[in-house]
């Protein structure tokens, strides 16, 4: 049996996240996937980034239709800093006999060995990754080999970030959001006037 954890800010969740999830779950077929929005520090929420409640709702709209996927408020509910080390430890306690995949984009894979308590973290989980942009593919291949275990799935990158999307909305840029976001996510963002 195996589970997969997919953490992120999801501010907002976009089609690049969705594609990452689809490609890697097709590759390793975990039995369950937990999508875990992380906490944004209060001072950042105050400066216009959206609340955990909204990001949970957006994740439900963006990923709720996928079989075996659960949206988890674990990091939002937890006191203190939400390092991945603590989250993975928690899921390891719940699923001691399962493989735990940690879904991430290439920017995260390339820095993974610098994360908080990285050595222990790497013993508990298997990084599961695709590239975010064409020019990091080679670096990802060699980074994945360097780790004792990591799965780098070769797939054409879908180059978008939540920062791009927040800027498009804030600056009222002429861009088809439907190419970057699920229609239900767009509708929630518009109704709640997020990122204006
Ligand atoms: P921001 O621009 O606000 O920093 P982001 O687009 O990088 O946000 P996050 O929510 O921080 O999104 O990312 C969560 C996870 O999804 C990370 O592991 C990140 O590498 C991965 N990811 C984000 N966008 C993509 C993408 N377009 N392709 C592949 N992986 C992605």
Image (cartoon, grey):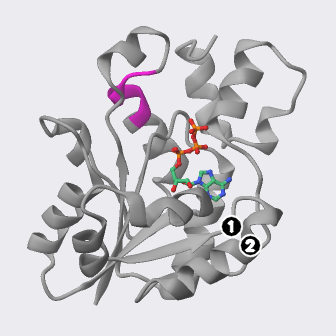
Query: Is there a contact, CB below 8 Å, between mark 1 and mark 2?
Result: yes
The residue lying toward the viewer, choosing from 34 and 61, is 34
Q: Which residue is mark 1?
A: 131
Q: Which residue is mark 2?
A: 137
> Element under label 1?
loop
In reply to whether residue 54 is colored magenta, the answer given is yes
Please report whichever mark, 1 or 2, sits nearer to the chain's N-terminal start: 1
Image quadrant where one finds the C terminus: top right
- Crowdedness near tag 1: few (<14), some (14–19) or many (≥20) residues, C-alpha within 10 Å: many
- Crowdedness near tag 2: few (<14), some (14–19) or many (≥20) residues, C-alpha within 10 Å: some
Q: With 56 as the anchor, is 175 left or right in this view?
A: right
> Element under label 2?
helix
Image quadrant where one finds the N terminus: bottom left
Q: Residue at x 68, y 67 (%)?
A: 131
Percent x, y of residue 165:
70, 31
Q: Which mark is residue 14?
A: none
Ligand 1 within 8 Å of disc 1? The answer is yes
Q: With 70 as the anchor, is 63 left or right in this view?
A: right
Q: Which residues are magenta?
A: 50-55
In reply to whether residue 34 is colored magenta, the answer given is no
Q: Residue at x 30, y 66 (%)?
A: 118
Say above or below: 47 vs 30: above
Percent x, y of residue 107:
59, 57
How many marks overall?
Answer: 2
Q: CA distance from mark 1 to mark 2?
A: 6 Å
């Amino acid at each position: 049996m195996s589970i997969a954890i997919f953490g992120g800010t999801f501010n907002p969740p976009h089609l690049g996240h969705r594609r990452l999830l689809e490609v890697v779950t097709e590759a390793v077929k975990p039995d369950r996937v937990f999508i875990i929005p992380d906490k944004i520090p209060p001072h950042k929420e105050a400066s216009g980034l959206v609340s955990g409640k909204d990001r949970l709702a957006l994740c439900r709209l963006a990923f709720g239709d996928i079989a075996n996927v659960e949206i988890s408020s674990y990091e939002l509910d937890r006191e203190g800093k939400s390092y991945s080390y603590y989250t993975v430890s928690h899921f390891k306690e719940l699923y001691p006999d399962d493989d735990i995949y940690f879904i991430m984009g290439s920017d995260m894979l390339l820095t993974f060995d610098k994360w908080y308590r990285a050595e222990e973290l790497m013993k508990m989980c298997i990084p599961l990754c695709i590239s975010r942009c064409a020019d990091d593919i080679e670096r990802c291949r060699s980074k994945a080999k360097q780790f004792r275990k990591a799965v780098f799935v070769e797939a054409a990158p879908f180059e978008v970030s939540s920062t791009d999307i927040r800027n498009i909305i804030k600056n009222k840029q002429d861009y088809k959001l439907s190419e970057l976001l699920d229609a239900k996510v767009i509708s929630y963002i518009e109704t709640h006037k997020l990122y204006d």
